[in-house]
Structures are given as C-alpha cells and as structure tokens.
Image: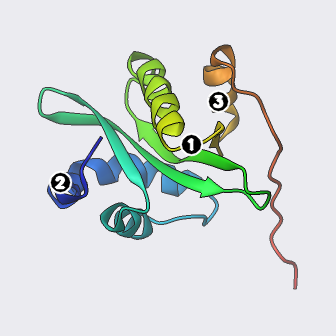
Amino acid sequence: MVPVTLVPLLWNEMEPHLQRVVDKSPNEMSTATLNNELMSGECLASIVYEGTNIIATCVFQRIELDTGRPVLYVKALGGERIDEWLERMTKLGHLIASDMGCVELRLNGRPGWTRKLKDDGWEIAHTVLTCKVRK
C-alpha cells in the first residue's frame, strides 16, 4: 500500500499506468481526480514494482451501495505484465475488503478483465451501456 505521504513522491511513476485506464474509460475519471482522492485518503493505492520501477498501479475505494452494502471498488487498475501480479493484487484486494468490512469486490472494466478474473470467482454483475445524446 502507498501511504498518503508517499503519493506525491510516486505519482509521476503511478500516473502513466492510471492514464491508460482513464483513456479507456468513457469520461468517468481523470488522473487529477484520482490524485486528489489518493491525497485525501478517500482512495488507497497499491503498486507493483520491479527494482525501483513501478510496473502497475491499483486504486481501491470503499463504497456503500444504495442498499447499504459495503464493497471495495477497484476504481483503476493498470500496468505492464499483468499475468505476473494480478493474482497477488486480487488477494490484496480481498484482504483490504475484509479489513474494511466489505462483503465483495467490484470492478468496472473492459471484457478482457472477465477472462482474466473468472477463474478467481469474479463474474459479470451487470453491463454498462452508453449512448451519446443525439441533437
């Protein structure tokens, strides 16, 4: 986990991984917002590094659904060489979720995430459809 005090020191290495996630998200977030949420403690970051290089960044956020159900939301997850670290990152997510009193993990992602995570018990809960407003 990245303590809030280290976010400014590591941000330049974390941001490129998060920027790729932002670029593939339909205007749902920005790296500036993620940085603010990490700095305020609203979100937590975890990194994977090799030597002194960060190769992946994950941003977690505890949210409560309208029903009051607490979940740990994987808000952004991106990096290189995913097969080398994804299993460890999901285990970490389970530990954080349990520690925070959450009952499940959630992630919005592209179809490739379904293939990567299905063997670990992840399943599609719903599909988000978007349509640009026609004038």
**Disc 1/disc 3 C-alpha distance (Å):** 28 Å
Among the 4 quarters of the image, the one containing residue 55 = top left
Of the two numbered discs 1 and 3 on the same chain, state the one appearing first in sequence. 1
Q: Nearer the viewer, mark 3 or mark 2?
A: 2
Instruction: Give the quadrant of the N terminus.
Output: top left
Residue that numbered label 1 is attached to: 101
In the current view of this chain or complex, which residue is farthest to the right?
A: 135
Identified at 14% across, 56% down, the residue is: 9
Name the residue tied to disc 2.
6
Which residue is more in the foreground, 31 or 44?
A: 44
Instruction: Label 3: state its secondary structure.
Output: helix
Quarter assignment of residue 54: top left
* Coordinates of residue 53 in the picture (x, y in percent): 18, 35
Which residue type carries mark 1?
Answer: Gly
Residue drawn at point x = 36 percent, y = 70 percent: 36
Please report whichever mark, 3 or 2, sits nearer to the chain's N-terminal start.
2
Instruction: Classify 72 as above or below 98.
Output: below
Label 2 environment density (alpha carbons within 10 Å; few <14, some 14–19, many ≥20) = few
Q: Amino acid at mark 3?
A: Gly
| Secondary structure type for disc 1 | loop
Q: Judge depth for marks 2 and 1 and give the one in front.
A: 1
- Position of the C terminus, as image quadrant, is bottom right
**How would you rate the neighbour count of disc 3 (Cα within 10 Å): few for under 14, some for 14-19, many for 20 or more?**
few
| Image quadrant in which you'd find residue 132 | bottom right
Asked which secondary structure carries label 2, the reply is helix
Marks 2 and 3: in contact by CB < 8 Å? no
**Spot occupied by residue 15 in the image (x, y as percentages of width and height):** 32, 54
Q: Amino acid at mark 2?
A: Leu
Which residue position is annotated with label 3? Answer: 112
What's the CA distance linking mark 2 and mark 1? 25 Å
